[in-house]
Amino acid sequence: MLKKLLGVTSTLALSVGLTACGPSEETGGSGSIGEELDYQIVGIDPGSGLMNVTQNKVMPGYNLDEKWELIEGSDTAMTAELTKAIKKENPIIVTGWIPHWIFNEFDLKMLEDPKGLYGEEEYIHTLVRHGLNEDLPEAYKFLDQFEWGPEEMQDVMVRIQSGKSEQEAAEEWAAENADLVDTWIEGVEPGNGEEIKMTYAAWADAIASNNVVKYVLENKLDYSVNLIQVEPGAMWAGVADGSVDAMIGAALPTTHAAYYEKFEGDFVDLGPNFTGLQNGLVVPAYMDIDSIEDIQDL
């Protein structure tokens, strides 16, 4: 319930602060796309790696910071604004990433990044606290073996977006992908009800992956999983200070580079669990722009 209330609050706050995407009274319906958008890009959680890269590298790198503003919100608020704009075929620019259910739901395109400021294709790493291998060796082994790809993650996200509960979606997916799940649990002994604390941010991909891991750990390996939703910085800090056992949402080498540097040495990096993450600015396919450079002229 708290997550839903936070999402609604973020959406309302963003809606109040964001000028309507359609032709406004100020533009008289004939202004540029930039004017119609009030030169605002719809972002997600403040402090997230995607927002930091967009604000501190991409916008100054393309001289967007002279005119454009990056609006803070949440994944929930961003997708709500995107949905509203597309229903009216209005222009909108959002921060986005692949995989995300919005690319299955809508006809979208990620703007080209000719300067490469968002970095190349990224990886999502699994990080655990120091001492986990000694305290919960079987859980450690499972987390080290957990690995999947864009199609699998996207499948879970779409199930959740279609109205299924997070654990119902995870259960259905696990049943249909038993061979892959078996590679994660191969050689792993049951946990006999032992608790493992995992932390994650409220992003569609993180919600999908953490709920799949929770389902498998609880229903295949007899662990009790405590999922703790926090802001991105707290996600890293929790593993670093040992207050949580693991996180499976470290986007590297670019998005979470600052967090990696800040906490380096205070966690164990088990390596990538996912390959194929891509960040950028996203627009509906009907918009006549293809590159971030095009925004400079809007």
Image (spheres, rainbow, N blue to C red):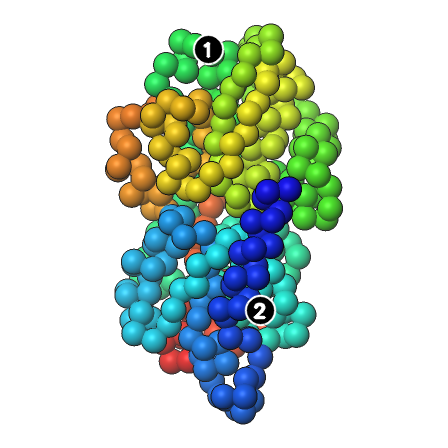
Left or right, 88 with reference to 64 = right
Q: Tell me the quarter of the picture where residue 183 sits.
A: top right
Q: Amino acid at mark 2?
A: Ala
- Alpha carbon distance from label 2 to label 1: 48 Å
What type is the residue that disc 1 sits on? Answer: Pro
Image quarter in which the C terminus is found:
bottom left
In the figure, 185 relative to 43: above or below?
above
- Of badges 2 and 1, nearer the viewer stands 1
Mark 1 nearby-residue class (10 Å; few <14, some 14–19, many ≥20): some
Decide if residue 227 is on the left or right side of residue 134: right
Q: Which mark is residue 285?
A: 2
Q: Is residue 225 left or right of residue 116?
A: right
Q: Residue at coordinates 34% horizontally, 27% vertically from top-left?
A: 240
Residue 132 vs residue 13, the one in the foreground: 13
Residue 201 x %, y %: 49, 41
Mark drawn on residue 137? 1
* Left or right position of 132 against 189: left
Taking 50 as reference, is 186 above or below it?
A: above
For residue 133, which quarter of the picture? top left
- Please tell me which residue lies in front, 232 or 292: 232
**Residue at left offset 37%, top offset 14%:** 131
**Residue in the image at 34% along x and 76% along y:** 67
Quadrant in the picture for the N terminus? top right
Asked which secondary structure carries label 2, the reply is: loop
- Element type at marker 1? helix
Label 2 close to label 1 by CB (< 8 Å) = no
Of the residues under marks 2 and 1, which one precedes in the sequence? 1
The residue at the point 53 percent across, 56 percent down is 10
| Residue 60 is at least partly visible in this image | yes
Q: Could you tell me residue 143's position as x and y percent? A: 49, 22
